[in-house]
Image (tube, grey):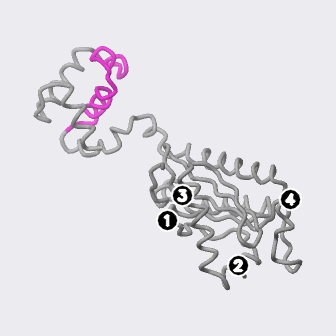
Amino acid sequence: MLKKVVTEDWLKSIGKEKVQALQDSFAALFNISLCLFSTEGKAQTVWSNSSLFCHYMFTNHRSRCIQERRKAIDYTLNKGQTGIFNCYMGLTFFCVPLMVDGKIKGIFYGGGFCSEENKNAFRGGTTYDIPILETKKIQELANFMGILIDLLDQKINTEEKKDPDTFKNIIFLQKKLSPREIDIVKLITEGLSNKEIASELNISDKTVKTHVSNILRKLEMKDRTQIIIFCQQIN
């Protein structure tokens, strides 16, 4: 199963208001209900275009509804991909994983409609105006939601995403090294030679060699291999 992490950091990076606005627009445009949940099943945004029928059922059958949601979320977490489900009342919904760097940070949960093939199983009668969607349309909506998530995520820490994972905690070196030395440490960990580092940073080989010597001295290390190991350990 893919590693599960919370949504709060992602929401802060994007801006919770922006995510809510996007969610509201998406739900209104396609006449569905939509909400972002953490991997633990806790709502991270306010339900958009919440179905009156679902609201009624949740109010009167809270435990069963939560159980259904938890089952769908767990399935999505285990599979690491979008899932389409039918609840015990015959409504259809989808779960789109919020994927960031190969990790699931949350689940966009959309519903409040019936699939065309499952409409006869709906147990809510005619009191509620439930949208009927073709299965193909539901899949398209879920896929579109995934595309929007990717577009949002591309705005987060663009420069940081260019660096390998070993640099995510490079901040621990900032008290010992200068910004230029940290740049060189990053390139050393990528496996670049002094000549390649010089070309990357547009400085001379001699300057790189001096920086490397200073880095080893400050970190009390003997060679470049120790630098790489050290960075991996603090990640």
Counting residues from the start of the chain, the first of labels 3 and 4 encountered is: 3
Whichever of callouts 4 and 1 sits on the residue coming sooner in the sequence is: 1
Q: CA distance from mark 1 to mark 3?
A: 8 Å
Tag 4–tag 2 contact (CB < 8 Å): no
Span of residues in magenta: 177-204
Residue 20 lies left or right of residue 77; in this view the side is right
Q: Which residue is mark 4?
A: 116
Disc 3 crowd rating (10 Å Cα; few below 14, some 14-19, many 20+) is many
Q: Tell whether position 97 is magenta.
A: no
Identify the residue under disc 3.
Answer: 106
- Mark 2 Cα-neighbour bin, 10 Å: few <14, some 14–19, many ≥20: few
Query: x, y (%) of residue 165?
Result: 38, 39
Mark 4 residue type:
Glu
Q: Secondary structure at mark 4?
A: helix
- In the rendering, at what x and y percent does residue 144 appear? 71, 48
Of label 1 and label 3, which has the lower sequence position?
Answer: 1
* Labels 3 & 4 near each other (Cβ < 8 A): no
| Left or right placement of residue 157 versus residue 139 in this view | left
Q: Earlier in the sequence, mark 3 or mark 2?
A: 2
Image position of 215 (left or right of 199): left
Q: Is residue 58 above or below residue 212?
A: below
